[in-house]
Image (cartoon, rainbow, N blue to C red):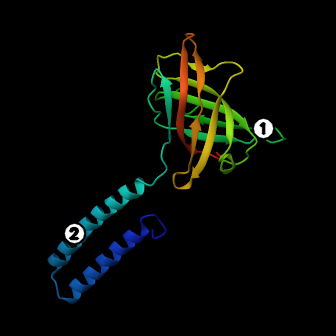
């Protein structure tokens, strides 16, 4: 227990309860008074633990997100994951940023997939690199899928890692997408915070 994120607080509370009970016993308190003291200490422990859990939860890795500047406007995504696939044999590696599990249908929108190749072999070595990516975008379940035109791409420039969130930041360059309905979507740029999935 004392090796967990809540250990310092939990251990202090346990010690406080033990001291309280010891003092009560040596002061000749009745069983009812000891039980009341224990109940009060237990309630206090629960309250402090819940507060600590909330504080730790605020520091847990984010789901990530992609915020696009588009015309027409697009809502920010509710998540963003980055995966680096190391191919080996001297071939380029693959980097993917997606707002949904690519093995299933999207459950939330916008659904965004960025796919490019890189010589980076670790996520940490992506920092500072600019990668040209194919981009796919669907703003709603009933919306057409838009993508970069054949031979075109969008640049993704990676910033620093965010170790406390197990994530990496990036910026998206300008691009023009064409939808399956032949309508154009202009990407004026964007911001990325992607949770890293290296080694999965």
In this picture, residue 109 sits left or right of residue 16: right
Q: Is residue 35 visible?
A: yes
Q: Quadrant of the N terminus?
A: bottom left
Image quadrant for the C terminus? top right
Identify the residue shown where x is 78% and y is 37%: 92
Q: Relative to residue 174, is residue 88 drawn left or right?
A: right
Q: Is residue 194 left or right of residue 9?
A: right
Residue at mark 1 to residue at mark 2: CA–CA distance: 62 Å
Rendered position, 178 above or below 61: above
Location of mark 1 (residue): 92
Q: Nearer the viewer, mark 1 or mark 2?
A: 1
Q: Quadrant of residue 112?
A: top right
The location of residue 158, given as percent across then percent down, is: 62, 43
| Image quadrant in which you'd find residue 89 | top right
In-front residue for pair 24/66: 66
Place of residue 174 in the rendered image (x, y in percent of width and height, measured from the top left): 59, 28
In this rendering, is residue 39 above or below 15? Answer: above
Q: How many marks?
A: 2
- The kind of secondary structure element at disc 1 is loop
> Which residue was labeled with disc 2?
39
The structure residue drawn at horizontal position 50% and vertical position 42%, both measured from the top left corner, is 64
For this rendering, which residue is in front, 175 or 48? 175
Residue nearest the observer in this picture, 150 or 197:
150
Q: Which mark is residue 7?
A: none
Q: Is residue 93 above or below residue 125?
A: above
Q: Does residue 104 appear anywhere in the picture?
A: no
């Amino acid at each position: 227990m004392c090796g967990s994120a809540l250990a310092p607080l939990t251990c202090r509370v346990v010690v406080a309860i033990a001291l309280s009970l010891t003092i009560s016993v040596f002061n000749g308190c009745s069983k009812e008074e000891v039980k009341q003291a224990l109940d009060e200490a237990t309630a206090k422990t629960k309250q402090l633990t819940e507060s600590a859990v909330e504080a730790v939860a605020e520091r847990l890795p984010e789901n990530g997100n992609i915020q696009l500047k588009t015309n027409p406007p697009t809502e920010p995504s509710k998540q963003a994951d980055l995966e680096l696939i190391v191919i080996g044999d001297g071939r380029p590696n693959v980097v993917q940023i997606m707002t949904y599990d690519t093995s299933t249908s999207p459950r939330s929108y916008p659904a965004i997939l960025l796919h490019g190749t890189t010589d980076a072999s670790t996520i940490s070595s992506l920092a500072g690199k600019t990668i040209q990516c194919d981009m796919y975008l669907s703003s709603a379940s009933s919306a057409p899928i838009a993508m970069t035109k054949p031979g075109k791409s969008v640049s993704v420039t990676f910033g620093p890692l965010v170790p406390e969130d197990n994530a990496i930041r990036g910026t998206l360059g300008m691009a023009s997408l064409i939808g399956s309905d032949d309508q154009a979507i202009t990407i004026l740029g964007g911001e990325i915070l992607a949770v890293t999935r290296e080694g999965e």
